[in-house]
Amino acid sequence: MTDKLGRGADVAAPRQKVRYAILAWFLIGGIINYVDRSALSIAAPKMIDELSFSNVDIGILGSAFSWAYAIMQLPAGWLIDRYGVKIVFSAGLLVWSVAEFFTGFASMLWVFILLRLLLGVGESPCMPSSAKATSFWFPARERGFASSIWDSASKWAPAFAPALLTAIMLMFGWREMFAVTGVAGIIFAVIFYFFYKNPDKSRALKKPERDYIIAGGGGVEHTADTKTTTKEYLALFRFRATWGMMLGYFCTIWIWNIYLVFLPLYLLHAFDITLAQMGVLAGIPWIGGAVGELISGYITKTIAARGITSSFHSKRIVIAICAVAAGVCVVIVPFNHSLPVAIGLLTISLAFIASITGNAWGLAGDVAPASKVASLGGLQNFGGYFGGTFSPILAGFIVDSTGSYSLAFISGGIIAACAALCYLLILRKPISSEDWKKALKRNTVAGSAS
């Protein structure tokens, strides 16, 4: 059984750690996800030159992805809870990889927009699938650290993608760059479908580790009894925890998407560097993001394991501290005119922002009933990328209008800091089994009345 601090109360940690090996599937999938997503920012300088695109056009392409990605979070989590990680994640991976491949053949803005929309549709199950698998494979106290590992893909990929993708682009062309990344995703989609197993089907998972996972609140099978109904899905909206997570992630992804879409262009124009230099320097801040996320995940895991506070509250506290720190760093960036200092500030700020994203995904497993983790994770991601739909367009408009990134960074930093208020003041407690039953009952009564 699980104690009030989210620890496996009766079962000692086993020597076998198959649960950590399984993270490799979602780490690799996440890396491919973000390499494909990052390709636009690397190709942007060439697209501006060759296709006469403006910064607003690039912002529109970034937002087109976010619109589709955000809207599809709503059914994605529900589909994963209903049909399982293997089927939904494999299908999504195949769809987004095909969209990535054909981006290299586009020439008109509306075609790029359609392909970015399709990319967003395909990528939408990636993070909710990983969160769902984490709830299967890990006890509650380890989910923050486990989530930080697979979510760190969203930082490792942008860290190394600029150098890799720039090299491919300079050697073969930006169109060929999209084709190569698309083919890699298609291959991985096939491999994942045939080889990934849930814990109830895994032959490698032995009884001591299985018992340890179940004692900590994991190991829940995906069966007909746990499939999410429409009424159960809608019941999540009755909880302030759901709204706190959605609003907090809105603030976080606002600045995240500005970095993801415009960071290479900012360095290229603010400091007059070459494309080759951009490929190296644009990746450095994301390394800070990956390291920061792993450190924060380890901190929350340690706090919960030592009984200082629950897994849920340890994540809230770390998120709030990191949100304020990230906001301060982001606001300072445009007032600096030194390239090394700018890289340092961007690296530190991304370390704090990444610490929010990893722990926020871990929260989904702490807050929601086990069979609704992907649904809640999808709702949180919807809130985040709803904000992410506006920030690239607004940033592009600011840059085209003022010739400067200052206002984009300042406003983004302030919004990022507001995440602390959402996770501390709105998200107060997890959804208890008693409250969940009451919400379902109210939804049933309301449905009968209508």
Image (cartoon, rainbow, N blue to C red):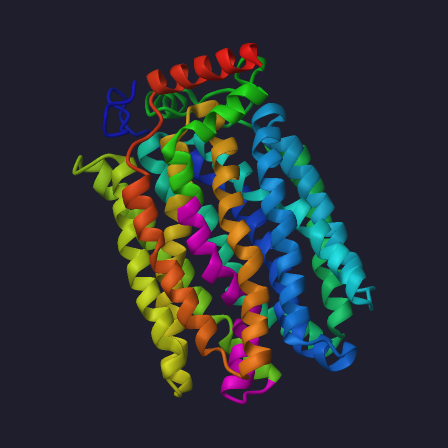
**Magenta residues?**
247-274
Identify which residue, 394 or 315, lies in the foreground.
Answer: 394
Q: Residue at x 43, y 49 (%)?
A: 249
Residue 16 in view, yes or no:
no
Q: Residue at x 25, y 19 (%)?
A: 10
> Above or below — where is 132 with respect to 432?
below
Name which quarter of the figure residue 134 lies in: top left
Judge whether residue 152 is colored magenta: no
Q: What percent of the width, then of the height, locates residue 442?
A: 44, 15
Q: Residue at x 43, y 55 (%)?
A: 252
Q: What percent of the width, then of the height, locates residue 255?
A: 46, 62
What is the quadrant of the C terminus in the image?
top right
Q: Residue at x 49, y 49 (%)?
A: 384
Q: What percent of the width, then of the height, locates residue 208?
A: 36, 22
Identify which residue, 49 or 131, lies in the foreground.
Answer: 49
What is the quadrant of the N terminus in the image?
top left
Q: Main secondary structure of the magenta part?
A: helix
Q: Is residue 421 left or right of residue 149?
A: left
Q: Is residue 211 left or right of residue 231?
A: left
Judge whether residue 268 is colored magenta: yes
Residue 102 in view, yes or no:
yes
